[in-house]
Amino acid sequence: MNIYGIRKLTLLDYPDKTACTLFTGGCNFRCPFCHNASLVQNRCEPMDIGALRAFLLKRRGLLDGVCVTGGEPLMHGEIGGLLAEIKALGYAVKLDTNGAYPDKLQELIGQQLIDYVAMDVKSSPAGYARAVGLHDIDISPVNESIKLLIGGAVDYEFRTTAVKGLHTPEDFTAIGDWIAGAKRYFLQNYADSGDILGAAADGAAADGAAADGAAADGAAANFAPFGRLELEQFLASVAPRVKFAALRGID
């Protein structure tokens, strides 16, 4: 499978481990606030797999783990082979996922190919369609993934990116109810990376082109980060329902 980029060193992506991060392309969601539009729309050049293997071989003993993110890694049929190669080199594996593929997630966990899962909870159940840019989404697979992780099959965290113009205080109260009993929850703030999917969709629409399935609701131009006090209030809505909750990446 294609890898579209690598962050050669991260001290943040994998809790308590020194790691690198690999980026897969493509996604089944069209979250208008997504900061990796080029990856989601497969507009990046893939890496040379031989160079990637050489890098991972060279870093054995120096890196503890490998994070696999996207895009959505689980949409690729070859993901199991990639994770198996990484595990065979002695690395711990962290997988980022949107939770849309619970059967694949369970299969890979059962094969002991994943050591840690970070799952995005995009919004409350009522707000999910707008948050993921798909009006007709069935969130039952997301719910299955939440239950699988809370069940303790693998170490994990849930996380939400808070976006002003998209999320409300009520969304976070509902998220707390949805993931009640979870081990870890992190709240992140929206940031404009310069490669926001909603902006790309708006531009395509303006040109009279198809927006690659993206919903135009809540254009990126109307999105903004929340203030710290607002984020702390949102977190306070979730914290009593989970074992650990914190803000992440907030100065």
Image (spheres, rainbow, N blue to C red):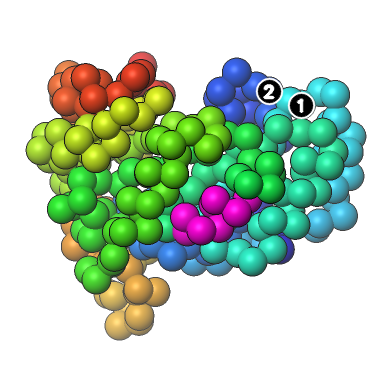
Q: Is residue 115 above or below residue 216?
A: above
| Amino acid on which the number 1 mark rests in the picture | Leu
Disc 1 residue crowd, few under 14, some 14–19, many 20+, Cα 10 Å: some
Give 240 or 32, whichever is nearer the viewer: 240
Q: Residue tagged by mark 1?
A: 63
Q: Earlier in the sequence, mark 1 or mark 2?
A: 2
Q: Is residue 213 visible?
A: yes
Q: Is residue 210 above or below residue 16?
A: below
What SS does tag 1 mark?
Answer: loop
Q: Which residues are magenta?
A: 101-108
Residue 57, percent from left and from top: 88, 38
Q: Residue tagged by mark 2?
A: 18
Q: CA distance from mark 1 to mark 2?
A: 5 Å
**Residue at 31% across / 28% down in the picture?**
181
Residue 144, percent from left and from top: 38, 52
Question: Of the numbered discs in the image, which one, if any, rests on residue 105?
Answer: none
